[in-house]
């Protein structure tokens, strides 16, 4: 199954993915893929985006609001092309591996509007039926991503304030129905 985790900018999609990873590990499952947590300065301002490989816990700076990274620019961010390539390579290895769930945080304007960044992995997903995958996408881009993936087993998970504390558990139980409903909410 492929799932799309949608929500508005800043609602906590990456935070929910971090909770989901912790929950899966608590249950003895092996998640993999990439997360894109915010890079925060000393004053609490978001100044960039980190890229974290879930299975190795390696982390690099993916994008900055200001800086001279050598890569594509979208919105207010300039991306590091080498780190993007490192993330794409790790993601492709995760999709070929024996992991229980592969997370992709996130597919955004760079991929969907310009065909850059992690866009090459979208073609891989069309015929990868033996994998369990969860893709993070902004609400405004979800329809475009649905059309590109074009799979009958696509599930949509919408993150809102009303489900922020329970959605990680609901997603885990949807992917792994044998999981007990008594799992701790993380």
Image (cartoon, helix red, strand yellow):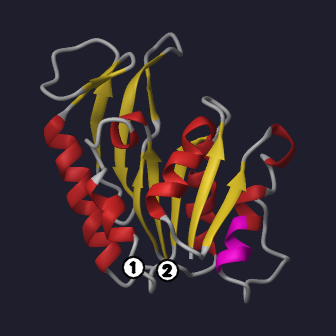
Q: In which quarter of the image is residue 113?
A: top left
Task: Provide the residue designation for mark 1.
Answer: 128
Cα distance in 3D space between marks 2 and 1: 14 Å
Q: Quadrant of residue 102?
A: bottom left
In screen coordinates, is 131 left or right of 164? Answer: left
Of pointers 2 and 1, the one earlier in the residue sequence: 2
- Which region of the structure is painted magenta? 171-175
Determine if residue 108 is in view.
yes
- In the image, residue 185 sits, relative to residue 177, either above or below, namely above
In the rendering, at what x and y percent does residue 117 appear? 27, 43
In the rendering, at what x and y percent does residue 95 appear? 34, 73
In the rendering, at what x and y percent does residue 89 appear? 20, 60
- In the image, residue 158 sits, relative to residue 184, either above or below, namely above
Q: Which mark is residue 100?
A: 2
Front position in the image: 61 or 82: 82
In screen coordinates, is 117 left or right of 140? Answer: left
Q: Mark 2: which secondary structure?
A: loop
| Residue at 20%, 32% in the rendered image | 80
């Amino acid at each position: 199954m492929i799932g799309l985790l949608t929500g508005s900018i800043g609602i906590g999609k990456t935070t929910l993915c971090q909770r989901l990873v912790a929950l899966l590990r608590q249950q003895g499952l092996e998640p993999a893929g990439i997360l894109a947590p915010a890079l925060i300065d000393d004053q609490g301002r978001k100044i960039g985006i980190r890229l974290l490989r879930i299975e190795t816990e390696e982390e690099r700076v993916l994008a900055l609001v200001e800086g001279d990274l050598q890569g594509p620019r979208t919105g207010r961010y300039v991306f590091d092309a080498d780190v993007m390539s490192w993330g794409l390579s790790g993601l492709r290895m995760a999709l070929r591996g024996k992991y229980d769930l592969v997370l992709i945080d996130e597919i955004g304007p760079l991929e969907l509007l310009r065909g850059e960044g992690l866009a090459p992995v979208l073609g891989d997903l069309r015929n990868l039926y033996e994998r369990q995958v969860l893709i993070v996408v902004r609400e405004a881009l979800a329809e475009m991503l649905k059309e590109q993936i074009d799979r009958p087993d696509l599930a949509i998970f919408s993150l809102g304030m009303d489900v922020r504390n329970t959605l990680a558990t609901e997603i885990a139980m949807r992917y792994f129905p044998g999981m007990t409903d008594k799992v701790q909410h993380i």
